[in-house]
Amino acid sequence: MQETRYITDENGERTGVILSIEEYERMVDALEDLEDADHIRAARETRARIERGEEETVPWEQARERIGSGEAFEEATDPESLARGQGVSSADFDELLGDFWPEEEGPEEFTAALGEWRREPARRAS
């Protein structure tokens, strides 16, 4: 990590930071990895609730029919209340999650792999 350099105003107050492109990209990658891990964790928690029978799902065709008829939008302000109002959950997470990542590997391994996959195009371009 390089020494941090600041931009200051006329009063000497720090107003910005100067970063190398490499440091900036590393920070963006780290933030994206954290966001990905949060989404994976939330999807797995929802999948577990569905498997325990705490939430019900609706088939895509049925959801599309309800949306097309306008029935689904009566007084709903967000996806969760929309689903709750219909007595179902908002998505079939088994279909959304897929089977591409082994269950025994956690979010940390997944985010590490994502970071590598994101860097591959940059390596090929250079």
Image: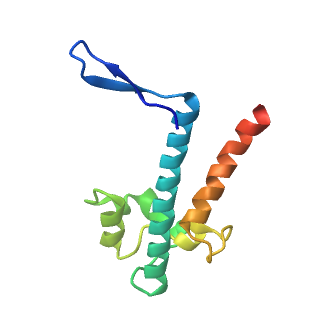
| Residue with the most extreme top position | 10
Determine the residue located farthest toward the bottom in the rendered image: 52
In the displayed structure image, the side of residue 126 where residue 26 appears, left or right: left
Residue at x 45% of width, y 57% of height: 68
Q: Residue at x 45, y 61 (%)?
A: 38
Asked whether 113 or 10 is in front, the reply is 10
Residue displayed at 54% across by 28% down: 20
Q: Is residue 50 above or below residue 20?
A: below
Give residue 35's position: percent from left, percent from top: 47, 54
Q: Is residue 64 visible?
A: no
> Quick one: 64 or 112, which is closer to the camera?
112
Residue 117, position in %: x, y?
69, 50
Residue at the image position 30 percent from the left and 70 percent from the top: 85
On the image, which quarter does residue 56 sit in?
A: bottom left
Please name whichever residue, 126 or 58, is drawn nearer the observer in this view of the structure: 126
Quarter holding the C terminus is: top right
Q: Residue furthest left?
A: 11
Determine if residue 115 is in view. Answer: yes
Residue 19 relative to residue 79: left or right: right
Where does residue 94 sit, x and y in percent of width and height?
57, 73
Q: Is residue 69 left or right of residue 113?
A: left
Give how far across and how far down residue 89 sits, in percent. Answer: 41, 72
| Picture mark count | 0
Report which quarter residue 110 is drawn in: bottom right
- How did the renderer colour the structure? rainbow
